Image (cartoon, grey):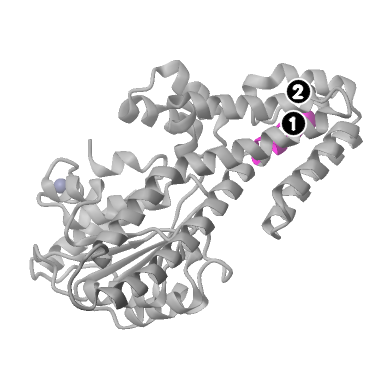
Amino acid sequence: MTVWSQVVGQADAVEVLTKAAQAAALIVRGEQAASGGMTHAWLFTGPPGSGRSVAARAFAAALQCDSGTGCGECSGCRTTMAGTHADVRLVVPEGLSISVAEMRALVQTAARRPTNGRWQVVIIEDADRLTEGAANALLKAVEEPPERTVFLLCAPSDHPDDVSVTIRSRCRGVSLRIPPAKAIAEVLVERDSVDPDTAKWAASVCGGHVGRARRLATDEAARERRAAVLRIPLGLRRPGDVFTLADELVKAAENEASEQSGTRDEIEREALKTALGAGGTGKGTASATRGSAGALKELERRQKSRATRTQRDTLDLALVDLAGFYRDVLVTASRSEAALNHPDHANDARTAAASWSPESTLRRLEAVLACREALELNVKPRIAVEAMVTTLYYG
Ligand SMILES: [Zn+2]
C-alpha cells in the first residue's frame, strides 16, 4: 500500500500532490523540474473528517520517500507516517494554542538543512487555531522560505476567519471533498481490518467523516454514545425526562474530555518537570523552582483549555447527530428520496414523522442548531442543552 491509499476518496488532490512530489524529487537531484509543480507552502482545506492532516502527512512522506513518491514501504515513508522522521515536524495546536516563541523556534529549526538532503517539512494541523502572534511569526517564514523548507497548513477552509489573507496568498491550495461512503468503507476494511458489514454500516452513518467512521467501527463506547444520543428524540415522554436526558448528554461529554486528557496531562506534566530539572539540589535551585512553578501553572491552564475544547467538540458531535435525526424526520415526512443521515434509525424517523407536524419537527431542528450556536458563544453547556431539550420535548 502506498501512502496515498490513506487519503480516502480524493483522486484529484492525490494527482496534484503526486506531481508536486515528482517535481520535488527532481529538485533534490539537482535537475530543473519541467513544470513548477512544487512550492514551499501548501494549504489543505476541507470539511472536518475529509482527511486534511492525513493528506498533508502523506505528501510529507512522498517528499521524504527513498524510492519514489510515497511508496509506503521505505524508511522515509514509514517514519513520516509514524511521526518520527527527523525532518518532519507536526504541530497540533488543539486547545493549546501555540505561542509566538514556540512558533519562532519552530520556524528556526525548519530553516536548517534537512538531515537526509531532501526537505524540512512542517505540518501545522488546525492552522485556524493559531494565535495572531503565532500566525505572524509563521507568515514571515512563508514569505521568505528557506530553500528546502516546506510548510503544510491544514484548515477547514481558506476563508479569512480560518486563515489570514496574507498567509493564504502565499500558499498553494489543495481542497479536499467529503469522501463518498463507499471509499470510506473500503479503507476501513483494508487498513483497519474491520469486517465488511460493520465497515459499510459505519461509513453510512459517519456523515463523511473518516475518523468518526473508524471510531464507530472499532470503539464500543463511541457506538454507545451515538446510540444514547439518538434515543433522545423518542425517549422524551414526560417533562422530567428533559433534565435527565440533558444531564446525560452533558455528563457524557465531560467524561469523554476527562478520559482523553487524563493520562496525556500527566505525561505532559512529568515531561515538563523533567525538562525543568525539578527536584535538583544544586546552586540556583530555589529560583529555578520558582520559575518552574510558573511554567507548571501555565501548562495546567492550557490543559484546562484543551479539556474544555474536547468537551465542546464532543457535545457538538452529539448535536450534529441529533440535528441529522430531525432532518431525517423531515425527509421521511416529505417522502423525499434524499439519503438519510442515520439509515439505521429509519424506523424511529418514520414513527416521529407520523406523530409530529413538519412545523414542530422544524422547531426541534432549529433548537439543536440554536444550541450549537449558544455553545460557540460560550453559554454554559448545561443551560444551553436544557433549553434545547425542553424544545425537543414540547416541539
Ligand atoms: Zn517510500
Q: Is most of the magenta stretch helix, strand or loop?
A: helix
15 in the magenta segment: no
User: Disc 2 marks which residue?
Assistant: 349
The residues colored magenta run 320-331
* Numbered mark located on residue 245 in the image: 1
Q: Quadrant of residue 274?
A: bottom left
Q: Is residue 137 above or below residue 44?
A: below
Q: Is residue 233 above or below residue 100?
A: above
Tell me the kind of residue under disc 1: Leu
Judged left or right of residue 147, residue 242 is right
* Numbered mark located on residue 173 in the image: none
- Residue at image point 43% right, 27% down: 185
Return the residue nearer the eye: 155 or 134.
134
325 in the magenta segment: yes
Crowding at mark 1 (Cα within 10 Å: few <14, some 14-19, many 20+): many
Q: Dot 1 lies on which element?
A: helix
Judged left or right of residue 37, residue 385 is right
- Residue at image point 14% right, 71% down: 32
Tell me the kind of residue under disc 2: Ala
Marks 2 and 1, how far apart in space?
A: 19 Å
Task: Say which quadrant the N terminus sits in.
Answer: top left
Percent x, y of residue 293: 39, 68
Answer whether labels 2 and 1 touch (C-beta < 8 Å).
no
Q: Dot 2 lies on which element?
A: helix
